[in-house]
Amino acid sequence: MELQARNKELEREKKALLEKNELFNKSKMSEQGSLEKRLEKALEGETRLQEELDAVKAERDAKYAEF
């Protein structure tokens, strides 16, 4: 009887650990998706800022050429 009780207890622990692991993996994937979106926005922002910087430099160079 003790072995059966111990076996049931271990099965419950196993099930709880598997559920905990599954939740951890889901949250990890969700976090990864969130980080990927943040990275994409940051890269888009970098591209936009580089384009603005290039435009300002071109405008500056054009003004120097006028003088």
Image (cartoon, rainbow, N blue to C red):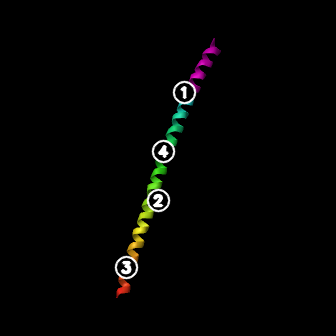
Say which residue appears at 45% left-offset and 52% top-offset. 38
Q: Which residue is mark 4?
A: 31
Q: Earlier in the sequence, mark 1 or mark 2?
A: 1
Indicate whether 66 appears above or below 34.
below
Q: Secondary structure at mark 3?
A: helix
Q: CA distance from mark 3 to mark 1?
A: 65 Å
Q: Nearer the viewer, residue 46 or 11?
A: 46
Q: Secondary structure at mark 2?
A: helix
Q: CA distance from mark 1 to mark 2?
A: 40 Å
Amino acid type of the residue tagged 3 in the rendering: Arg
Q: Which is closer to the viewer, label 1 or label 2?
A: 2
Q: Which residue is mark 3?
A: 60
- Quadrant in which the N terminus is drawn: top right
Residue 30 in magenta stretch: no
User: Which picture quadrant has residue 62?
Assistant: bottom left
Say which residue appears at 63% left-offset and 14% top-offset. 4
Q: Which residue is mark 1?
A: 16
